[in-house]
Image (tube, rainbow, N blue to C red):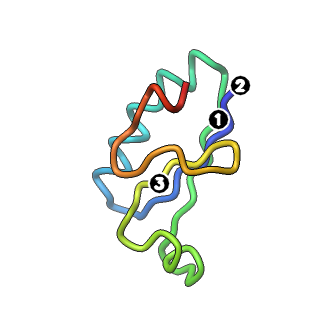
Amino acid sequence: MLDLYLYGREDCHLCDEMLSELEPLLQASGGKCHLIKVNGDPDLEHRYGARVPVLVGGGRELCQFKLDGEVVT
């Protein structure tokens, strides 16, 4: 089962796009994606800045900006 974390911002079209592309993978695996907004959190804004969306799984960054389905599955 996939347990992923998507770091992003509100009103971010790339974040919305990555989440949409993740949905079929999550449904097929029974996985979950936890959405984490970096807005307003100084530590997260420092770590991710303008690199959002960043997808994290298994304690490591899997991809940023665009979903890499091969890395996620």
For the residues labelled 1 and 2, the Cα–Cα distance comes to 8 Å
- Label 3: how many residues lie within 10 Å, few (<14), some (14-19) or many (20+)? many
* SS under mark 1: strand
Q: Which mark is residue 32?
A: 1
For discs 3 and 1, the disc positioned in front in the rendered view = 3
Q: Quadrant of residue 12?
A: bottom left
Q: Residue at x 62, y 42 (%)?
A: 4
Check disc 1 and give the amino acid type.
Lys
Residue pointed to by mark 3? 54
Residue pointed to by mark 2? 1
Residue 57 location (% of width, % of height): 63, 43
Is 32 positioned to the left or the right of 40 in the image? right
For the residues labelled 3 and 1, the Cα–Cα distance comes to 15 Å
Check the image and report above or below for 67 versus 46. above
Q: Residue at x 60, y 49 (%)?
A: 5
Residue 58 location (% of width, % of height): 69, 43
